[in-house]
Image (cartoon, rainbow, N blue to C red):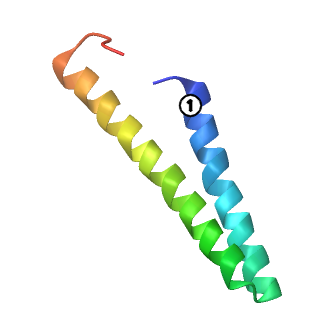
Amino acid sequence: MGTGDRFENSAEETKGKVKQGLGEMTDNDRLKTEGQADEAKGNLKNAGEDIKDAAKRVFGGDKG
């Protein structure tokens, strides 16, 4: 997996954390929910990349 993709996923997680924090500070439930969704999406993407990397280590080669 490319470093750029991992960076983008981490940026999405961070964006989500910031949104959640702002939502907490302003008592804005919509912003908190959006932040949680963004963070979860970044986490899921990184988990998918971890699975791909593990499969490459187990089965060898670069298939993607």
* Viewer-nearest residue: 31 or 47: 31
Q: Classify 10 Å Cα crowding around label 1: few (below 14), some (14-19), many (20 and above).
A: few
User: Residue at the front extreme?
Assistant: 30
Q: Residue at x 61, y 55 (%)?
A: 13
According to the image, label 1 marks what residue? 5
Q: Position of residue 26 (x, y in %)?
A: 82, 85
Q: Residue at x 67, y 56 (%)?
A: 14
* Viewer-nearest residue: 4 or 23: 23
Q: Assign a secondary structure to mark 1.
A: helix
Please tell me how many numbered marks the rendered image carries.
1
User: Residue at the top extreme?
Assistant: 61
Q: Is residue 3 above or below residue 10?
A: above
Q: Quadrant of the C terminus?
A: top left
- Give the left or right position of residue 48, taking residue 5 as reference: left
Q: Quadrant of the N terminus?
A: top left
- Give the left or right position of residue 46, taking residue 14 as reference: left
User: Residue at the left extreme?
Assistant: 59
Q: Residue at x 27, y 21 (%)?
A: 56
Q: Position of residue 58 (x, y in %)?
A: 18, 24
Q: Position of residue 43 (x, y in %)?
A: 48, 53
Q: Is residue 15 above or below residue 61?
A: below
Q: Is residue 29 above or below residue 57?
A: below
Q: Residue at x 22, y 14 (%)?
A: 60
Q: Is residue 55 above or below residue 35?
A: above
Amino acid type assigned to the residue bearing label 1 in the image: Asp
User: Residue at the right extreme?
Assistant: 26
Quarter of the image for residue 53 reads top left
